[in-house]
Every structure is written in structure tokens, then in C-alpha cells.
Image (spheres, rainbow, N blue to C red):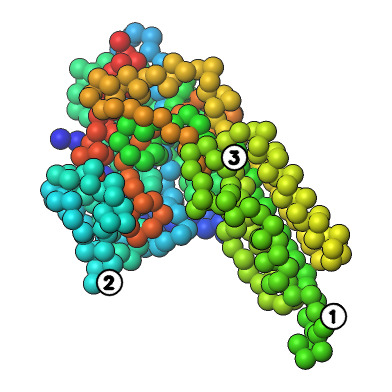
Amino acid sequence: MYTTLEHFLKYVSYDTQSDENSGKVPSTPGQWELAREIERELNERGLHDVSVSEYCYVMGTLPANTSKEIPAIGFIAHMDTAAEASGKNVKPRIVKNYDGGDIQLNEKIILSPQDFPFMKNYIGDDLIVTDGTTLLGADDKAGIAEIMGAVDWLIAHPEIKHGDVKVAFTPDEEIGELAKNLDIQKFGADFAYTIDGGALGEVSYENFNAASAVLKIHGRSVHPGSAKGLMLSAITLGNEFLLMLPSSETPAATEGHEGFYHCLTFKADTEDAELRFIIRDHDMTKFESRKKFFVKCVDWLRDKYGAEHFELEMHDQYYNMLEKVKDHMNIVELPVNAMKELGIKPFFTATRGGTDGAALSWRGLITPNIFAGGHNYHGRFEFISVQVMEKATAVILKMIELAGK
């Protein structure tokens, strides 16, 4: 029906895993390769104002086909994949007419509804899975494919009257770039949507407030045979700090609007340790309290062992888009109404992370998020339904159609 699947299978062949340690934007060369391919496709389809910026942001416009005044709607998805699992040599496989049982990804790895009960929601669908050695890349190449599938359909069906349709594909979302170099004025959308969510029907206009923190600990190494009262093990001090943070406020123990502290990495020997954290909360007051508590714990250790042993760097990363979207709820209502017309039950989630749309909303371009359809993002158990991808494309098209009425 749509070209969405064709696009998706092509895009996942590009290794676009981002790298937070590169110091460049985009952080990896594979993102340039995918950007150039999308640029070629947009030009081939005759879109206007097609460009790839110096920071690898792809933009284009499908011009209005009516003289009626209709808002310019933007659709955005990111090109990079997560650092947690390899995105190289992705080998997608389509499991036709899924029967609700286990799916053998390779000799050792099984994707099972015993581990992921929501797989049962897709009985009868065609599921795209990995070979168990890489992630799939539906986050967010499914979003790109769904947008491109909608573009192809609009070109083939000029009877659908629409205003300017703006598309943008961004780099390094997974490592916190969050579309910071997207030229909003050049993009030209009146409002936009990121196609980067989870299950069918998901709509999100809330996300975490976010901060990152790096704690460096400088210990004192002494021969263990004569270390009593002299050695300060950076490993032990790091563990002491971790035990000060509430065990009930970690990602594994929280859900919904509950915030957390999360230690991403802990690299240490006796002499030195470095702990990297993220701090999250939907509520701004609680977010500020979390940061203050974190600093208080560091200060307690400084008082106990000496300030010279602890260095702390902390900075805010992004904020909850709700503060900006709440006065523009008509923009949220458009995808909700589109889903209802298509027989899809919409539901709202508070995103437990950040999106390009969160940062863009704070910069003045209101950009809530709608589903792309994938599950188990960032790992080898990732999967997505072909039928849900097609429904995502249908929702995009229905939104454009409703905005044109």
C-alpha cells in the first residue's frame, strides 16, 4: 500500500550509531551517508528547498497544492541509532503472520512473549526483527520511513489538498544533540511533530527535565600491606556515593512520572574513579530538589574525606515540553483526531526521556511526539510491526488532510 517498508529496509542498512565521545556533529560518518541518501530521494521526488546543513540536518518542502491558507506542518525524525548496541550490518527479518510464540533470532537468542508480553498484541501482524546481534534501528528509522511513505503517497495522490509539508531529519538525537542546530526559521513550519514514539496510538507532549553529572574521585594508592589509615580507594568512595542515592529511585524501580538517578558508567581503580550520571524528573520542583540532593551527597563526602578528592560537573540537558505545549493543545488534538478517524485508539504518555521536539518546543517550534511503532529500542530484541508502520504513515496523511479542511 505505502512505500514505508521499502524505505525502512533501506535505511536500516546504514550504520548510523552515534558516538558521544567524538566531539563532532554529526558524531559519526554513517549519518552523513544516510543524510545524502535522503537528500537524493527528496530531490528525486521534486521537493523544494532540499538541503543538508553543515551539521547534517536534512530539510525539504512538499509545496502546497491549494491556494487555501493552511498551516505549514513539519514532521521530524532522527537518523542516528543508540550507543547501547551495534547498528552495523543490521540484518532485518520479517516474521509473517506472527503466531504469538517465541521467535528464534539466532542459535542462542530468543525473542519471547514470556519476557515481552506485549508481543501478544501483534498476533497476525508481520514483525520485523533482528538477527540477535545488533539493534534494528526502528528508533528512529521507522519514523523516517513513515514520513517518506507519506510524502510518496501525497505525490501520487494530488487530490489530497494540503499546505506546505515540511520534513526534517536530524543527527545525534540519542546523545543529546536534540536538534540544537536545526534552523527553525529556514525550516518554516508553523508547528511540527516528531515521529519517534512507541506503541500504536501513543501521543506525548510531556518529557523529563534532564541533567547530567560527572563525579571524578581522586583516591590515594598505598601498598595494601601497609595501607591502614592511609589508603583512600577511589572504588570504595565511588561505591559509598552510590549507596547514598535512593535505591528506589533508579530507572529499574520507577515508571510513569516518577523521576530517578541513574549511574551510566563507573570506571575506577584505586587511584581514580569517574562516575557518569543522568538525573530525571517530570516535575521541575522535584527536578531541582534532585540536583540539590545530589550535590549535598558530594559535599558530605568532601567534608568526610577532603574536598580535594571530589570534582563534580553538572549541567542541565533539556526541559519538559509540557510548559510550552500546554497553551497550544490544538496542536496535540490534530493527531488525536486523525487517529480516531482511522479507528486507532490514542493514548497519552509522559515520555521518560527527551526528544528533539522537547528542545524545539522550548525554542519556539511547538513539537509534540507521536508513535513510530517500535518496541525494545536500543537492543537486540527490538522489533516493529509492518502494519503499525503503515498505520503511522496513515496517521501522518490524515493529519495533513484534516489540517487542509
Cα gap from disc 2 to disc 1, whole angstroms? 48 Å
Give the mark, 3 or 1, whose residue is nearer the N terminus: 1
In the image, taking residue 246 as reference, residue 166 lies left or right, namely left
Q: Amino acid at mark 3?
A: Asp
- Closer to the camera: disc 2 or disc 1? 1
Quadrant in which the N terminus is drawn: top left
In space, the residues marked 3 and 1 are separated at their CA atoms by 40 Å
Image point 34% across, 48% down: which residue? 375
Is disc 2 placed on a helix, strand or loop? loop
Image point (41%, 54%), residue name: 378
The disc label shown at residue 108, or none: 2
Q: Residue at x 40, y 39 (%)?
A: 196
Q: Quadrant of the C terminus?
A: top left
Q: Which residue is mark 3?
A: 281
Where's residue 327, x and y in %? 54, 17
Secondary element at image label 3: strand
Q: Residue 236's spot in the image, x, y percent?
A: 71, 71
Mark 1 lies on residue:
230
Quick check: 176 left or right of 380?
A: right
Q: Amino acid at mark 1?
A: Leu
Question: Which residue is more in the foreground, 213 or 86?
Answer: 213
Is 44 placed above or below 329 here?
below
Mark 2 crowd level (few <14, some 14–19, many ≥20, 10 Å Cα): few
Q: Is residue 241 shown left or right of residue 88?
A: right
**Precedes in sequence: disc 2 or disc 1:** 2
The answer to whether residue 128 is seen in the rendering is yes
User: Does residue 148 appear in this view?
Assistant: no
- Coordinates of residue 268 in the picture (x, y in percent): 66, 72
In this view, the residue in front, 206 or 29, is 206
